[in-house]
Each structure stands twice: as structure tokens, then as C-alpha cells.
Amino acid sequence: MFEEILAALVAQGVRFVVIGGIAATIHGSARFTNDIDICYDTGPDNLERLVRLLAGWHAYLRGVEPGLPFVLDVRALRTTPIMTLTTDVGAIDLLDRVPGVGDYTAAVAVSELVRIGRVEFRALRLESLIASKRAVRRPRDIEHLIELEALLALRKREKNRS
Amino acid sequence: MTLSELALLVGADSKWLLNAAAVLPMPRRYTLALARRLTLARALQSDLGVPLPRAYAMAGEALRRYVGDATPVTLAQSGAGTVEVRIDVHRELSALSVRMSQLQTMYAPRRRGPRPSARRDPLRAASDYGLDLSLLRANLGRTPTERLRQLDGMAQFARRVRRPR
């Protein structure tokens, strides 16, 4: 499911950085997440690719009743900072900027290249994930923050040992 | 619906809503119908500079004439027909639908009060909170691919369980 989404994004040439729960999982988080969060480049060519992909997946808004007015095109993506969608291949959240980090360019600067199977993409570094969770400060983010900080401490400890 | 939830739906900040409430004949209860009308009024005010009371009246008219499709609603036209004010109600309501989805899936009020101390030992804080550190250690022993595939398996199971029969 997640691998399929990531593979399709990469295959379509969408410029994005994986953030949120999936990035946390890649760094070792044990928390369950059911959706994939990405921060995308708002360049017109990138938005077109993203819209085409989402249309093919029959994307619709998550958590609301069917049949509401909903336009998913380049203009809508350009003017909407956050979109929470459900698709044929799973739930996906689109953000044009990461809280506590900044826009796509800023997110790329604090991300690292990850390889899952044959798919290569960028994911936010653990330190930057912590910064974004600190910036949002919802109760569930604060719970997650405790785990991410513990992960960072464990990683540092292991690094010092080796 | 709370003031901050209505503000999120309208795409405005709470202060804008409070100011709007002072000059508009707004109902006291915050409803989705009010959010729709304020969304259009805000668009007319911020994009065209229409004074808010006039924009609110025009928004009401636009919603009455909206038939649920993407055809823009014409709100005003000059006598010669050379100038007209049109609003794409469908697109504005689509933006509102996006914010509704956000409200349902992501929104939670920010936690108030001081930030947790950064000087506290993170491992101790996690243990005190009840996190199983052995689970994190085990995860760190896996590759990113193994971690993601493990989560993928759990997510697919969750989807199968939740899917209506």
C-alpha cells in the first residue's frame, strides 16, 4: 500500500518529501499510521503530475460525506495548503509546507534519501520531524514527540558505542 | 462547532470572525450553513474589496442561486452588460469541503502552557510515559524497508477489518 503509493509518485516524477508518520516509521517509530503525508513542490509541472495521479486513484476528501462540492485540479492544489484525501490505494495527506520546517525546498534541505526496495525518495530527517511535531503541538503530536526524542537518543547512544 | 473550528472552515482567523460578528446579522450558533455563507463573503471581501455587509448579502444570494454545478453565479451586472460580478461558488465550496476534511482528520486545538522541558532525559521520559523502549530498539535493528513493510502489513490488515462486508 505505502510502497505502491511511493513507487507511483516516483514513477510519475512527482517532487515530494515524505513527512509525518511514514517518515517516523522509516526512522524506527513503532506507532501505527494509516496514511502517508507528503510535502510537495508547488511548481506547475509538479502539480499537474500530482493531480493526474490523484485523479487516477479517484481521490476524494477523507472524513466527510460523499457528494460534497470538490474540485481537484492544479488551481485547487496551488491554493490549498493541506489536503487530506482517501484514494483507491490508501489515505494520503498533501501539504505544501511542513510546520516548523517550511516549504518543499526547506523540507528537501532537511531530508535524506531513502531506498525502499527499488524505490528511492526523500524523507524528512528525524531531527526535522521532531521540529515539526514541536511546532504543531496537538496532543497526539506531543505523544509522538516523546517517542521520536527517545528514538533520537537511542540512535545517538548506539552511534557513540560504535 | 467552536469559534476556532468555524474559523478553520471559513479559512479566516478567529479575530476576523469576531469582527465580522460585530457588523453582520450573524446567527449565534455556528453552523455549516453559516460557514458556507462566510466563506463566500470572505472571498468577495478579500478578492474584490466588497465591504463585508454587502459581501454577506451577496453571498446569501449566491448560495440561493447555486444549483450544485461548476457554473459561476452572476451577482451583479452593469446596465450595458459590460461589467459583471461573478463568483465560482462551486470552487469556493470545494475549498470549504477540503477544510471540513481537515477538521475531521487532522485538527486538534494546540496544547496550551509551557513547552515540555528539553533538558529531561528522553529515554526516561518515554519510559515514564509508558513507551516500550525494547520495541524501539528492535525497530532500530531493522532496515527502513523492513520497518515500512511491517507497517504496510498492519495497515492492510486494518483496512480489511474496517472494510464493510
Image: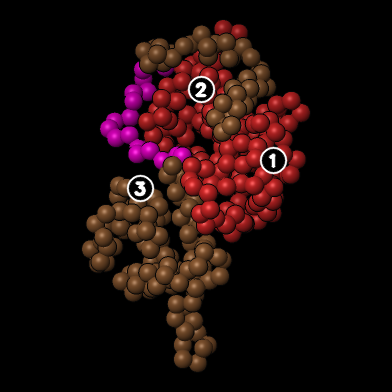
Does residue A8 appear left or right of residue B79 in this picture? right
Which of the pair B93/A94 is nearer the observer?
A: B93
Amino acid type shown at disc 2: Arg
**Are callouts 3 and 2 both on one chain?**
no
* Alpha-carbon span between mark 3 and mark 2: 27 Å
Instruction: Give how far across and how far down residue B133 sits, in percent.
Output: 48, 11
Question: Looking at the image, is A136 positioned above or below residue B22?
Answer: above
Residue A156 position in % (x across, y down): 53, 15
The residue located at (45%, 50%) in the rendering is: B99
How far apart are the alpha carbons under marks 1 and 2?
Answer: 24 Å
Q: Dot 2: what SS? A: loop
Secondary structure character of the magenta stretch overall? loop
Q: Is residue B149 left or right of residue B123?
A: right
Q: Residues within 10 Å of mark 2 (few under 14, many from 20)?
A: few
| The color chain A is rendered in | red
Q: Which residue is mark 2?
A: A31
Element at label 3: helix
The residue closer to the viewer here, B55 or A143, is B55
Judged from this view, the residue extending furthest toward the bottom is B80
Using the image, tell me which numbered label, if any, was put on residue A9.
1
Q: Is residue A16 above or below residue A51?
A: above
Give the percent coordinates (x, y) of residue B155.
59, 26
Chain in brown in the render: B
One can see residue A103 in this view: no
Name the residue located 59 percent from the left edge and 14 percent from the top edge: B140
Which residue occupies 32% across, 47% down?
B1
The label nearer to you, 1 versus 3, is 3
Residues shaded magenta: B105-122
Residue B120 appears at what percent x and percent y?
36, 17
Q: Is residue B118 magenta?
A: yes
Residue picked out by circle 3: B5
> Which chain letter matches label 1?
A
